[in-house]
């Protein structure tokens, strides 16, 4: 998904197209995301033995030393590829890598702070693809929408992992009152719906974006909200999955709109 967001951000923000630069940025984003995942799996091995025993490290398929070497190789790959595109892209890769380090060692156990960081980095993938491009500004609302979907999803993931985190001695967002967490999740949903059609209203995206958002994204959103209101604790896995599906649908709405407009220009 990170790689797809970078492609979309790059594609949306200008007609000039370099396959080499796009591939390098996609691979840099994937390597950076991979680094964050590997580092967290290394540090979370004790809680993953309880909450996610099927993952490679708890299962013993990979040693911690092997995973550590792999994480270093991912950092080197991300920085080499991004600096090969431009110094601006190199810096734009270096900063999130530092943030991932801070998150893994200091913020992960801080209620809400860690969730906000992760959600911001997910949204950042879309912006990353548009750096130095002509119409970079049209990515701001889609990135904000991605943030509003991922923040609740990160909170839900913390609730799913609450048992293992408690045994491992971690204090996460799941330790906060459920009423507060539900309020944050509902608040994000309300703001999301308020902003969903603004790109269409502002003519940043066209008819296809509006149509897919109305016929696909909105029904998924409503379905997820119904499940959440019915019984959040029993539906955590399905709700989390629907958040991911909704984000993919949102990206697909933007991509379909861009493809439609590009096809019209080619015909003309």
Image: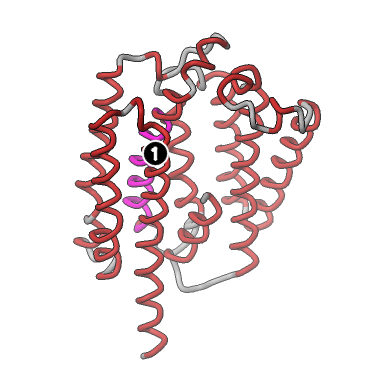
**Residue 196, above or below 36:** below
Q: Examine the rendering and report whether any part of residue 253 can be seen.
A: yes
Q: Is residue 153 magenta?
A: yes
Q: Position of residue 144 (x, y in %)?
A: 34, 45
Residues drawn in magenta = 138-155
**Residue 187, above or below 76:** above
Q: Position of residue 138 (x, y in %)?
A: 34, 58
- Which residue sits at x=40%, y=78%? 262
SS for tag 1?
helix
Foreground residue among 88 and 187: 187
Q: Position of residue 150 (x, y in %)?
A: 40, 39
Q: How dense is the environment of label 1, judged by Cα within 10 Å: few (below 14), some, or many (20 and up)? A: few
**Residue 98, above or below 44:** below
- Which residue sits at x=47%, y=57%? 130
Q: Which residue is mark 1?
A: 238
Which SS type dominates the magenta stretch?
A: helix
């Amino acid at each position: 998904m990170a790689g797809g967001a970078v492609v979309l951000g790059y594609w949306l923000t200008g007609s000039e197209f370099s396959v080499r630069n796009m591939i390098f940025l996609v691979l840099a984003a994937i390597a950076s995301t991979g680094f964050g995942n590997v580092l967290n799996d290394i540090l979370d091995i004790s809680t993953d033995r309880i909450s996610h025993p099927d993952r490679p490290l708890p299962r013993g398929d990979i040693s911690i030393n092997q995973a550590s070497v792999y994480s270093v190789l991912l950092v080197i790959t991300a920085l080499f590829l991004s600096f090969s595109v431009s110094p601006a892209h190199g810096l734009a890769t270096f900063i999130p890598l530092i943030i991932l380090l801070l998150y893994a060692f200091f913020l992960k156990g801080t209620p809400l702070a860690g969730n906000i960081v992760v959600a911001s980095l997910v949204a950042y993938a879309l912006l990353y693809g548009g750096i130095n491009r002509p119409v970079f500004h049209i990515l701001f609302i889609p990135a904000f929408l991605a943030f509003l979907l991922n923040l609740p999803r990160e909170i839900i993931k913390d609730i799913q992992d609450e048992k293992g985190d408690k045994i491992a001695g971690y204090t996460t967002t799941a330790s906060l009152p459920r009423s507060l967490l539900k309020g944050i999740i509902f608040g994000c949903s309300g703001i999301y719906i308020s902003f969903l059609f603004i790109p269409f209203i502002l003519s940043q995206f066209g008819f296809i974006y509006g149509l897919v958002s109305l016929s696909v994204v909105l029904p998924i959103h409503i379905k997820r909200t119904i499940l959440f209101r019915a019984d959040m604790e029993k539906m955590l896995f399905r709700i989390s999955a629907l958040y991911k599906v909704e984000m993919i649908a949102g990206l697909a709405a933007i991509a379909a709109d861009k493809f439609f407009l590009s096809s019209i220009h080619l015909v003309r």
